Image: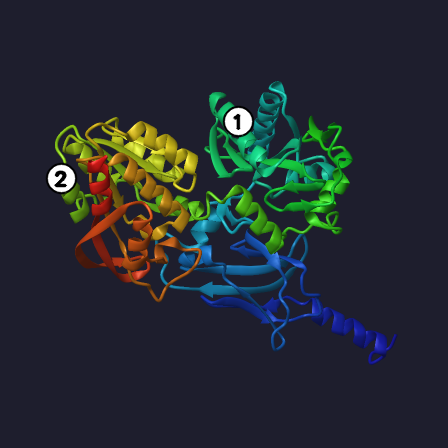
Amino acid sequence: MPNGEPGDAARRAADVDRAVREARVSTASIEWAADATEPGAAIDIEVDGRRLWSEHLPEPLDGRRVVSWPAPLRPYLRGSGTLRVRASGGPVIAEGRYRFARERRRSLRRLAEAGTVLDKWGKLVPAANQELHDALLDGTERIVGELQAVGFVVAITGGTLLGAVRSGDILERDDDSDLLLYLGEASPTEVSLASYRVERLLIASGHTVIRHSDAHLQIMLQPTAAGISAHVDVFMGFHDRGVYSQPIHVRGDLPVEAILPITGIRLGGREVPSVADPEAWLAACYGPTWRVPDPAFSFETPIATRRRFENWFGTYDFTRHFWEARAARGRRGRRARGRGADVRHILRRTRRGDSVLDVGAGRGAAAAVLAGHRRRVTAIDFATTAVEAAVERSRGRFDVERVNLADGRAVLDLISRQREPEGTSVLLRDVLAYLPEDSRANVFRLIRAVIGERGIAVATFPDRATRRYEHLRPDTWHLPLSWLSAELHRHGLAYTLHRRTLRRTSAGVRRFVHISIHAAESSIESRRSS
C-alpha cells in the first residue's frame, strides 16, 4: 500500500502507541504519557531490572498515568538507577531514571538486590523462588498429615488451590501456602474453640504458631538452608445455618457438596487434599474471573463481611508487620536506650529478686538493664523479630516470651504465670499509645491482676497528636490522659503523672508523659474492708 494510505497511517499510530514512554520519577510518584491500554491491566514496577511490586494500571489523568509510591517503600527512596513499568508478563510500557537523596543503608537499589518485593498485603518480603516453594510443599504435607491424624477435615485453599487448578503447582509469586480446616455446621463460638484446639495440637507438634484471629492461624516453618522463612496459613471454614463462611474473605452461598467429599489434586508433583468442587470454591473467593491470571490481585472484602468476621473472631495482628519490620531494622550491636527515667523509676521501687514484667520489650534493652540490677525479668513482645533479638541479648539473664496483647486468652495465661505473693511490677515503655483500645483493656486487666500490694506499673507514651499521623503507622498514634483516665477507671485503676518531656521520634518531636498506674483509692478501700 502506498505511503499516505489510511492503513499505513493506522500502523504508524499503532507503533507510536506501543513505544516505550519516558517515565518521570519523583519521591511522590511515577508518571508517564498514557497509551490506549485499558485501565485495570496488571503492571509490574521494576527497579534496576528486578520486579519490586505489581498493581493495576490507573486511569489516565490529563493524558498521563500516575502511580504513587506505596507507603512501605517511601523510607527506601534513596540513590539512583533505572525504573521500568512493564505489562505483567509482557513488554515495557515506560522507563526512566530515578535520582533521590544520597544512598545510605536503605535504598531502592539495595532493596531490589536483596530480592525483596512488596506482596499483595503491602508487606516487604523475599521474592518467591523454588527453594521457598519446596519448603512450602514439605511444610504443607507435614501439617496436613498432623491434622488428618487427629480427625480434622483438611484441604488446600486460597492461592494454593488456585495454583493447583491452573498449573498443578504453587503460583510463581506465592510466598505461602493456604489450608482449609472444614468444621461442618458450626457456630462462631464453636469455631473459636476449635481454633484453640488446633493451636494446642500444632504447638505440641513443635510448631511456632501466630494467631491472626480465632479463625486464622499461621504456622511458621523452619528456615531453609539458605535462611529463607516460609509459613502455612490455616483458615477455619464452616457452614452456619446454610451460609458458608471462611475468614478472611469468603462468605456466601457455597453448598456443602462443594466442600465434601474431600478429593485429591496434584500440586508440585504431589497429591494433596482438595475440596470436592475446586472451581465453585475459587469462584466464591475470587469471583467469576478467577481463571484469568492477575499478578496485582488483592482482596476487596465487602465491609459487611469484614465487620462480621472481625466481630466474631477478632483481629490479633493489626500492627504486627509494622513492628516486625521496625525490630528487624535495628542494627546489631547498636547501643539501645535502656536507662530511661521509667527504668530508674522501676529500680527505685523494687528490690533485688523482685519480679518485673517488661511489656512491649522490643529488642530487650530495658530488660537487660533491669536484669543487670538483679531483678527477675520477663520480657514480652509480639513481633517475632523483636523476640529473637531479645533472646540473643538476654544470654539467659532474663526470660523472653512472645505474647499477643490482643489475645485475651494469651493475656490470661500470662497472668496465671506472673502472679506472685509480693506482686509483679510492670514496665510499659512506649506501649500504651500504640495499642488499640481493646488491647489496652487486656493490659489493664494484667496490671490489676499482678501488681499486688508492692508492685508498680510505670508507663511512658506520647499524649498529643502528631501532624505525621498515619492510621497504619502505630508510632504516630497518641493517648490523651483523659482517655487513659476513663479506661483505667473501668478497671479500678488510676494514674499519677510524674513528668512531661519532649523526645525526637520517627514521627517528629513529640511530648511524652511518664506515669505510674496503681489501684484507685476506692478499690483499695474496698479490698481492705473485704
Residue appearing at x 46%, y 44% in the figure:
317
Number of numbered discs: 2
- From the image, which quarter does the N terminus lie in? bottom right
Q: Element at badge 1?
A: helix
Q: Is residue 252 above or below residue 155?
A: below
Q: CA distance from mark 1 to mark 2?
A: 41 Å
Q: Residue furthest bottom?
A: 4
Which mark is drawn over residue 197?
Answer: 1
Question: Which amino acid type is shown beneath numbered disc 1?
Answer: Arg
Q: Quadrant of residue 17?
A: bottom right
Q: Which numbered marker is on residue 253?
A: none
Specify few, some or many for label 1: CA neighbours under 10 Å numbering under 14, 14-19, or 20 or more: few
Q: How busy is the neighbourhood of tag 2: few (under 14 within 10 Å), some, or many (20 plus)? A: few
Relative to 332, 201 lies left or right? right
Q: Residue furthest top?
A: 149
Residue placed most toward the observer, 451 or 392? 451
Per the image, the residue denoted by label 2 is: 349
Residue placed most toward the observer, 120 or 111: 120
In this rendering, the answer to whether 2 lies above or below 472 is: below
Residue 277 x %, y %? 77, 36
Q: Amino acid at mark 2?
A: Arg
Report whether 51 appears left or right of 5. left
Task: Give x and y (percent) for residue 304.
Answer: 61, 54
250 vs 399, left or right, is right
Position above or below: 492 against 181: below
Q: Quick check: can you spot residue 171?
A: no
In percent of the image, x 60 and y 19: which residue is there?
150
The front one of 260 and 208 is: 260
Q: Residue at x 20, y 40 (%)?
A: 456
Q: Earlier in the sequence, mark 1 or mark 2?
A: 1
